[in-house]
Amino acid sequence: MALTINKKAMQPVYSASLLTKSYHLIQDYLAISKFKVVAMLVLTAWVGLALAPDVGRGVGVQFISLLGIGLLSAAAAAINHVVDSEIDSKMARTRHRPVAKGRLSKLHALSFATVIGVAGFIMLMLWANTLTAILTLFALVGYAFIYTSFLKRATPQNIVIGGLAGAMPPLLGWVSETNQMAAAPWLLVMIIFTWTPPHFWALAIARKSDYERAKIPMLPVTHGIDFCKTCVLAYSVLLAIVCVFPYLIGMSGLIYLSGACLLNIVFIYKAINLKFAAKEDTAMDLFRFSIIHLMILFIILFIDKWLVI
């Protein structure tokens, strides 16, 4: 008796399998792109763009400029996954990342990074300006290569020195609009630059054993948790001071000042708790709040500028 195969019955199975693989592949792409982190960077770039002098650029062109910044940032994140794959495989927090786990090969991830990076660079060249494209490319090199390949493994001040690359988006947004540098957006860069150490050191305290196992010289590993807590508190106070500068130079008004003061009071309170009354989850609580802090701070800055008469 001849065996017959119903090809029509098999088609839904193949389609479902293809859809499942496509879904998981998209999820892996989003993971190596650090989508949530990039979304935060694009938010700060958007605020930098919104605060820049109006030069009559259309919303569509502005959107493409922000997309270009986001794609180059995502490319840097993907390269970071490749360079750090061996380290990631040793850490509980990162061992399930696509490249570390082997779901994506290094070549696959680098090819993806190249495609989106080139696309982002072309977008900035065509719809923004050459200065923005070059500055964004420098930020990619600073994060993906100088920080990830060298600083992260070389010094406990890796976050402080390498934080400048991640702090650049507000300046990039401003320059994409004006095609020139200015002092004002550098204040926004300084806010993120000052915010970065307490943000990452709080995570490093909570994940100290991970960094020890991976032999990464994060501050709590090299100088101890108590010293790192002191640095977190010191930078939290410094952050509160830096956050006042936009008001002092007239970039923002009382709405921003009030919101910034409230956010930084909470930040310092949590840093004091971490230093003097830490519990098991205190460090992660500060880490999570720091993300909310930066997001709300920049949203309030935008509201103060554009939505308050």
Image: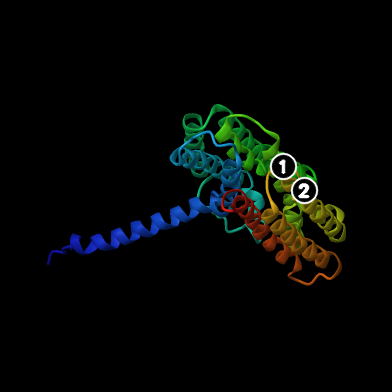
Residues packed near mark 1 inside 10 Å, few (<14), some (14 to 19) or many (20 plus): many
Q: Residue at x 75, y 68 (%)?
A: 282
Give the left or right position of residue 39, taking residue 200 as reference.
left
Is 6 situated above or below 166?
A: below
Give the left or right position of residue 268, taking residue 148 as reference.
right
Looking at the image, which is closer to me, 102 or 84?
A: 84
Total numbered badges shown on the rendered structure: 2
Looking at the image, which is closer to me, 11 or 265?
A: 265
Residues packed near mark 2 inside 10 Å, few (<14), some (14 to 19) or many (20 plus): some
User: Residue 256 got which mark?
Assistant: none
| Quarter of the image that includes the N terminus | bottom left
Look at label 2 and name its amino acid. Answer: Val
**CA distance separating discs 2 and 1:** 8 Å
Q: Position of residue 187 (x, y in %)?
A: 72, 42
Q: Tell me whether the residue at label 2 lies in contact with that at label 1, contact meaning CB atoms closer than 8 angstroms.
A: yes
Is residue 103 visible in this depiction of the protein? no
As helix, strand or loop, the secondary structure at mark 1 comes to helix
Colour scheme of the rendered structure: rainbow
Is residue 229 visible in this depiction of the protein? yes
Q: Position of residue 272 (x, y in %)?
A: 83, 64
Q: Position of residue 305 (x, y in %)?
A: 61, 48
Residue at the far left in the pictured view: 1
Look at label 1 and name its amino acid. Answer: Leu
- In the rendered image, which residue does mark 1 sit on? 187
- In the rendered image, which residue does mark 2 sit on? 242
Query: Which sits earlier in the primary sequence, circle 2 or circle 1?
Result: 1
Q: Position of residue 264 (x, y in %)?
A: 75, 59
Q: Residue at x 76, y 71 (%)?
A: 280
